[in-house]
Amino acid sequence: MTLPSGGLPRRFLDLLTRPLVAGPAWWSVVSRLPVYLMSLALVLTVREQGGGYAQAGLVAALYTLGMALGSPLIARHLDRRGRAAVLTATALAYPAALTVLVWFTHPGGWAQPAAAVVAGAVLPPANACMRSLWARLPLREEERETAYLWEALLTEVLVISAPLMLAALMLVGSAGLALTTVAVIGGLGTLGLAHTRLPAGTEAAGTADIRADSGAGTAHHDTGPSRSPAADGPADRSDPRRLLGPLREPALLALTAVMALSAVPIGLLTLAIPAFVDRHGAPGGAGVVYACWGVGSAVGALWLGRSQSEVAPQTRFPRLLLAYALGTGLTLLAGSQLGLALALAVGSAPIALVSATEMTLVSTIADGRSLAEAFTWASLATVLGDALGQQAGGLLMDPLGPRAVFAVATGTALAAAALAFACRGLLTRRAAPMVECAV
């Protein structure tokens, strides 16, 4: 079968089979497998060991806490030291920490929660690494847009397929063995990403300035207003603003705020969907309804993504968020399980496009010396918003019911779109070192 010339599948294929691009792209897929199933795997493992749901939930929550605390620091080292050292270290430490948790600790003691925190803290920064590499690889602008659309689509695919992989592994072994296997596979993928070849100069775009700065304290890269060398010199290292890293940039801070707010409806719907399905007499159908949500997003990316590069990202971002809000509002019209499934399938069409545009904006706003950390903060913003939405959904569900939670989700999505329109002027700065393709 011949793919249509210029079609999105052809663009993906051309990008992902290109020499010196295919290696990091495909290794990054393998390295990210644990990201999308580890919380579930931890719960299943602790339950298999005889722990209760409270203990399983604690271990999963502490793993997430460790990830939130450790990932910005690891990403900062990734920007400063380069991918080989940081990815190699985390590729070895992460499977080791999870192996200790599974085979050498038990529910009820202090060692298992401690191991969960450590495992989360040393999670390999494969997402941040690959997304920052897309910003530095020698690509045309439309190819870079395709790369971030691929990242958004890949997230949807992994969210659906990674738990299925876990289930398949559990058919031939225990939950603990499946968890360990996935962790080792992820570690091997991270090693591949750490040592695969890149086009000449790709890494230097993000790390050379840092290395020069650490050696002399004066060299720096800045595309904004000129500053004196002292602003980046050793005397400034005690400045508490350094702890914020790339979030010192107002545009990136505004973008992460929008991302966090736009993720709240996802968390709200995560609670409201099964409650709605349960009230309409088919609790076993919640998984099918969830699948329609993810499939709609993936189809929307494939159907609408081919025309996205025709509009500037700072212009299309608030428009996509408005479409996302209107799509969320379709859930208010659902009166049955089938109606909700259709509403989610249609309404989720902009979700992956919103995610892809967010990545494009991060890559163009963030300073080239801190791209990996910027992508990490962006990811944490969505995790925080999702968690806040789930917490709010749990509190609102009993007194108000799922339809009211759908309404809150729609209102929150509209607020995120309004904030994006208000911040549109901030999102025009281009600071990252984009390397254009010579052909």
Image (cartoon, grey):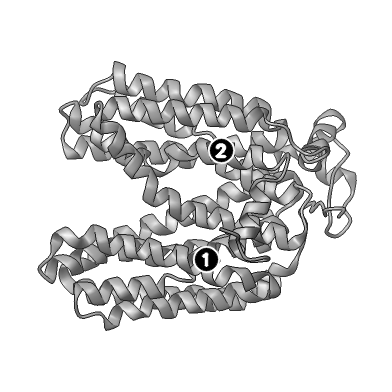
Q: Residue 87 in the image: state x and y as whole percent.
A: 60, 29
Find residue 413 and report its image quarter.
bottom left
Find residue 33 and report its image quarter.
top left
Taking 395 as reference, is 268 left or right? right
Q: Residue at x 19, y 61 (%)?
A: 285
Q: Residue at x 58, y 36 (%)?
A: 27
Find residue 316 and report its image quarter.
bottom right
Q: Which residue is mark 2?
A: 125
| Amino acid type of the residue tagged 2 in the rendering | Pro
10 Å neighbourhood of mark 2: few (<14), some, or many (≥20)? many
Q: Residue at x 79, y 54 (%)?
A: 434
Q: Which residue is mark 1?
A: 301
Mark 1, secondary structure of its residue: helix
**Label 2 – label 1 distance at C-alpha:** 25 Å
Q: Residue 343 in the image: state x and y as whole percent.
A: 33, 76
Taking 147 as reference, is 154 left or right? left
| Amino acid type of the residue tagged 1 in the rendering | Ala
Instruction: Pick the quarter of the image with the N terminus.
Output: bottom right
